Amino acid sequence: MGSVEDRQMTRCPWAVGEIYERYHDEEWGVPCHDERHLFEMLNLEGAQAGLSWITILKRREGYRAVFDNFDPTRCANYSDEELEEKLKDERIIRNRLKVFGVRKNAQAYLRLCEEFGSLDTYLWGFVDGKPIQNRLETMSDIPANSPLSDRIRKDLKKRGFTFVGSTIVYAYMQAIGMVNDHLVGCQRWGEVGS
């Protein structure tokens, strides 16, 4: 049970339940520049494709354990046999394309870092280093994608990333704080946007 302050906090309507509340209050929309976290979230957003986000959040620690805390170098070097073993692990979504996609994304990530220095530099270059501050009133105002997420999607795909559709990329941008889509009536909108 949260503190009195937690229970009185005005949140986005989707943040219901302890897991979602914690994610909403501590992480979603907060500008992130941590390289490991950026790589983790890119893969988790891809794992979410076709599923609800709560399904992934509940398995997050399992994903971290199975994929060596999303260390890109380790992930890039997984053998087919290692990935086959990971497919048996019930702590993650056991989808062959998504599991093998972690290796593919890690290899693409390492190539991207050779060119840009980091995923952080690459991603935040699309927004000149500053989050997009939206002023959304209702849940129906939150877009599923944007021209920018489509541009990033095309570029990531060209660079060899997988599970990076425009909707996934937009959710990723929200998660890592490239865009602030907290509703204006939510306490976090001003906190994240300041």
Image: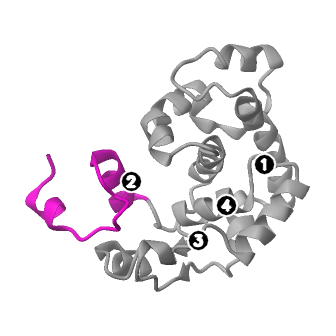
Horizontally, is 189 left or right of 1 in the view? right
> Does residue 24 show up magenta in the picture?
yes
| Type of amino acid under label 4 | Thr
Residue 23: give its label: 2
**Residue at mark 4 to residue at mark 2: CA–CA distance:** 19 Å
Q: How is the protein colored in the picture? A: one colour
Question: Which is more N-terminal, label 4 or label 3?
Answer: 4
Count of numbered badges drawn on the protein: 4
Question: Which is more foreground, mark 3 or mark 4?
Answer: 4
Residue 167: give its label: 4
Question: Which is more foreground, mark 1 or mark 3?
Answer: 3
User: Dot 1, crowdedness within 10 Å: few (<14), some or many (≥20)?
Assistant: many
Question: Which is more N-terminal, label 2 or label 3?
Answer: 2
Question: Which is more N-terminal, label 1 or label 4?
Answer: 1
**Residue at mark 1 to residue at mark 3: CA–CA distance:** 18 Å
- Disc 1 designates what residue? 109
Q: Are marks 3 and 2 in contact (CB under 8 Å)?
A: no
Choose top left, top right, bottom left or bottom right for residue 150: bottom right
- Disc 3 designates what residue? 178
Question: Which is more foreground, mark 4 or mark 2?
Answer: 4
> Which residue appears at 65% of the width and 48% of the height?
39
Question: Which is more N-terminal, label 1 or label 2?
Answer: 2
**Residue at mark 3 to residue at mark 4: CA–CA distance:** 14 Å
Q: Are marks 4 and 2 in contact (CB under 8 Å)?
A: no
> Which residue appears at 63% of the width and 24% of the height?
94
**Residue at mark 4 to residue at mark 1: CA–CA distance:** 20 Å
User: Dot 3, crowdedness within 10 Å: few (<14), some or many (≥20)?
Assistant: many
Q: Is 162 situated above or below 179?
A: above
Magenta stretch in the rendered image: 1-27
74 or 176: nearer the viewer = 176
Quarter of the image containing the C terminus?
bottom left
| Type of amino acid under label 1 | Tyr
